[in-house]
Amino acid sequence: MHTFFNIPNPKVQAAFWPFCRPSKAACTPKQGLPMTPTQHTVLITGGATGIGFALAKKFHAAGNRVILVGRREDVLRQAVEQLSGSLHDNGARCGYAVADVSQAEDRARLAAQFPETGILINNAGIQFTKRLDEQTDDEIAQEIAVNLTAPVQLTRAFLPVLAGKPQAAVINVSSGLAVVPKETCAVYCATKAALHSFSQVLRWQLENSGIRVFEILPPMVATPMSKGKGHAHLKISPDELADEFWRDFERNRFESMIGKTKWLYWINRFSARLGQRIMRKGL
Ligand SMILES: NC(=O)c1ccc[n+]([C@@H]2O[C@H](COP(=O)([O-])OP(=O)(O)OC[C@H]3O[C@@H](n4cnc5c(N)ncnc54)[C@H](OP(=O)(O)O)[C@@H]3O)[C@@H](O)[C@H]2O)c1
């Protein structure tokens, strides 16, 4: 199975993808031209590490102001120092907020504190790689709260803020596991499948507004979350993910299936049984 997944190089993937991507109707609401990818304030949950930080670097380098959100202030401060040092912006275009997105008061505080936000990136996530009968009540509640309740409620809290902008976006980071789940993390996969569905429906609900809804479906990415899991050679770097997403973002492609997620999507369309055989034990 792994050999099969290794065959396509990025150029071959890119050549085939126009034939495999979800139908245009499903991912292209009537929102005119692609949004200007610069001069927004971008609030990124989980923005100090892994995928969130790679997206922060990308948006920052493109001339946006980024606000990183997380629970650990030392990690947030380091990330902001790295960003401001890299482009000599003296901190004018990056900042941070300490918040736990699973807490309603923290979500309300973020929306009140950053009314200039034009792009909300719901990226924070946690994963417990355990059988359901090994998970505690608290772990299950936490996983659902961070991965699903937080993006849904944070989006709702920010809708009035985003509605006031000429161009705005919500970007949800789900997972390839939303397309086909794996055996070792039932709750995680369920939250990501729900986030995928939520993104699709929200896109319909907002199609006549100035708020676009993007979704990033990452494959295995080498981040703190995936450390010690899966095969190292099958993981892409967070920067590779951000580069690939950026190409979709600039073209108004709302469902950004990254790397091997494209293949998984296509295989699953062709044969759901084959998709499940490949994914059941994880990559
Ligand atoms: N890595 C992969 O292979 C992979 C694949 C598919 C999808 N994803 C998804 O990509 C997203 C980013 O994950 P990652 O791989 O970059 O992992 P990561 O480096 O562990 O990032 C998770 C981030 O979320 C923040 N976070 C966690 N709980 C939070 C809370 N309650 N409130 C605020 N922030 C919180 C963490 O910061 P603090 O701990 O400081 O709060 C951390 O910065 C997740 O949604 C994940 O499910 C990852």
Image (cartoon, rainbow, N blue to C red):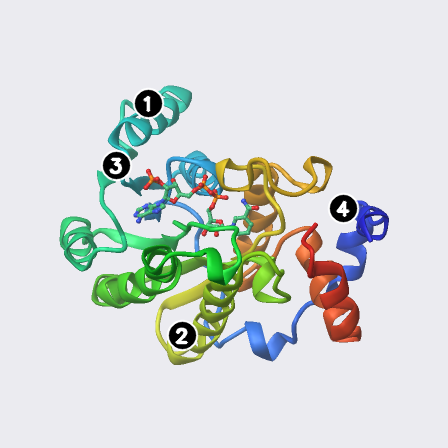
Kindly check if marks 4 and 1 are in contact, taking CB atoms under 8 A apart as contact. no
Q: Earlier in the sequence, mark 2 or mark 4?
A: 4
Would you name the residue on which mark 3 appears? 96
What amino acid type is highlighted by mark number 2?
A: Leu
- Please tell me in which quadrant of the rendered image residue 270 appears: bottom right
What amino acid type is highlighted by mark number 1?
A: Glu
Q: Earlier in the sequence, mark 2 or mark 1?
A: 1
| Relative side of 236 to 123, left or right | right
Task: Tell me residue 276's x, y (percent).
Answer: 72, 67
Would you name the residue on which mark 2 appears? 202
Q: Earlier in the sequence, mark 1 or mark 3?
A: 1
What amino acid type is highlighted by mark number 4?
A: Pro
Q: Residues within 10 Å of mark 2 (few under 14, many from 20)?
A: some
Q: Residues within 10 Å of mark 3 (few under 14, many from 20)?
A: many
Mark 2, secondary structure of its residue: helix
Q: Earlier in the sequence, mark 3 or mark 2?
A: 3
Q: Give the Cα separation between the discs numbered 4 and 1.
A: 33 Å
Residue at 35 percent across and 74 percent down: it is: 209
Would you name the residue on which mark 1 appears? 81
Q: Give the Cα separation between the discs numbered 3 and 2.
A: 27 Å
**Residue 10: numbered disc:** 4
Q: Give the Cα separation between the discs numbered 4 and 3.
A: 34 Å
* Nearer to me, 42 or 177: 177
Q: Residues within 10 Å of mark 1 (few under 14, many from 20)?
A: some
Mark 4, secondary structure of its residue: helix
Kindly check if marks 3 and 2 are in contact, taking CB atoms under 8 A apart as contact. no
Q: Is residue 167 visible?
A: no
Residue 191, placed above or below residue 139: below
